[in-house]
Image: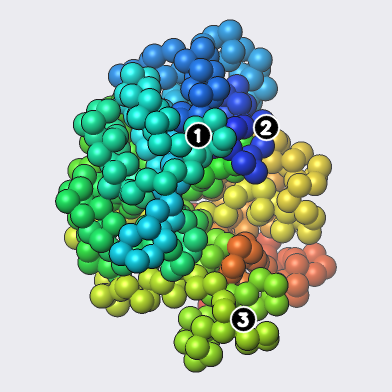
Amino acid sequence: MRFIADLHIHSPFSRATSKNMELESLNRWAQIKGLTVVGTGDFTHPRWFSRLQERLEEAEEGLYRLKPEYRVKGDNDVPGTCRKNIRFVLSAEVSCIYSKNGRTRKVHHLLLAPAFAAAQRINTALAKIGNLKADGRPILGLDSKALMKIVLDASPDVLLIPAHAWTPHFSIFGSNSGFDSIEECFEEFTPYVHAIETGLSSDPPMNWRLSKLDRISLISNSDAHSPRKLAREANIFDTELSYKGIRDSIKGREKTRFISTIEFFPEEGKYHYDGHRPCKQRMHPFDTRQNNGLCLKCGDKVTVGVLHRVDSLADRSEDIAPPNAVPYRRVIPLEEIIAEVYDVGVNTRLVEKKYNMLTATLGDEISILLNISTKEIGEVGSPLLGTAVHRVREGKVSIAPGYDGEYGTIKIFDKTEKRGSCKSLCHPRNLLSPIETLGEGYDFL
């Protein structure tokens, strides 16, 4: 069975997270987005764990569904074109802050558990180390390899996956507080690391530049803090719908079962380039090196971004893919595309109205972004919208890369292209299938 899974999200009990991240809302938005499986997030938090036990019931092995009494209202708000049965997998993120080899390390890890009993054993062990009530993503003074031992003792089927692996401040390869290799972080427990999460600011080709990562899977998830952010990155599997099916697909790295990942354009991520946000300085790694790591404007130290960090650790050129590399597809969230087409803000009523119309008519967001013909999108939405989706599929966009916590800015059209009637953009030749190119004459970064 082919399905899409977003395994890393947060609950209302995590800091800076929407109060709408309740199970009912997640169940509704997962359908609209096109997911089949979504992580619960934050099973380490006592109140959220209790809510999960109260409102979920077992479906397939290791997967759960919302009980009918909690599902009714939300399902009524889902367009018929998007409705499907959503499954939840028990997930959590743990922040490990500790000293190792003379440096302070700050590493976040995604946990996937096969059952409530295993999650409870993890929670019992972690509660002896730190306060699990303080945050949905607990901050613990715990070595990463010690966390690995705890989860394996709870169940050998638990997956521990280094989260957003390149983020400068809180990740295994982060420039500020990470490591130079998985082996340095996990030592004798390295064989139990079967995957890393690439994060929004990197994509598979960037990770392919490290030959040491050839043996593990590269997974992608939204790390959503609000329901509308679900599925901005995700994973496509073709396997039995079960925890075991997902786990084995990740561990096995077989392209017949782990089909592909859905990716942000990494330049849109908040830490792709180097930079200094207070001075609004965005810097390419070359410029950072030339200026000894200092801001071009004020002279303070810059935040070294993901591209720079990958360059520092890479042992391959950019054009080499390892054997059995899992394919990927890049997307821009549909609301962002609509906002650009109509020259309005993403959070405006017009964008909401157009989004609802498109999903009610054509189906879920991922299908619109990846599969539905751009000709049909143009007929239902507008010719310019069809062209915009076509360009995104072709990767023909211009991006001012994100840096030091600022998201990058993507443009699909320039101002001159959108003036007047936009006849050239609305021409039928620009509403072809995604395997056909737009031709010559476009100057994109």
Q: Which residue is mark 3?
A: 300
Q: Which residue is mark 2?
A: 19
Going from N to C along the chain, the mark reached first, 1 or 3, is: 1
Amino acid beneath label 2:
Lys
Residue type, label 3: Asp
In percent of width and height, residue 176 lies at 46, 67
- The image position of residue 135, as x and y in percent, is 56, 37
From the viewer's perspective, is residue 319 above or below residue 249? below
Q: Is 425 or 73 nearer to us in this picture?
A: 73
How much space separates mark 2 and mark 1, taking CA atoms? 21 Å
Position of 226 relative to 302 (above/below)? above
- Near-viewer residue (96 or 240): 96
- Which quarter of the rendering shows the C terminus? bottom right
Please give the name of the residue rendered at 42% of the width and 61% of the height, measured from the top-left corner: 104
How dense is the environment of label 2, judged by Cα within 10 Å: few (below 14), some, or many (20 and up)?
few
Distance of label 3 from label 2 (alpha carbons) = 37 Å
Q: Secondary structure at mark 3?
A: loop
Q: How far apart are the alpha carbons under marks 1 and 3?
A: 35 Å
Question: Outermost residue, bottom direction?
Answer: 290
The reply to whether residue 213 is in sight is no
Indicate which disc residue 131 carries. 1
Percent across and percent down for residue 256 are: 23, 43
Q: Residues within 10 Å of mark 3 (few under 14, many from 20)?
A: few
Compared with 365, 220 (above or below) is below
> Hey, what amino acid is under mark 1?
Asn
SS for dot 1 = loop
- The colour scheme is rainbow
- Residue extending furthest toward the top: 69
Q: Is residue 410 left or right of residue 190?
A: right
Residue 47, quarter of the rendered image:
top right
Q: Residue at x 42, y 30 (%)?
A: 127
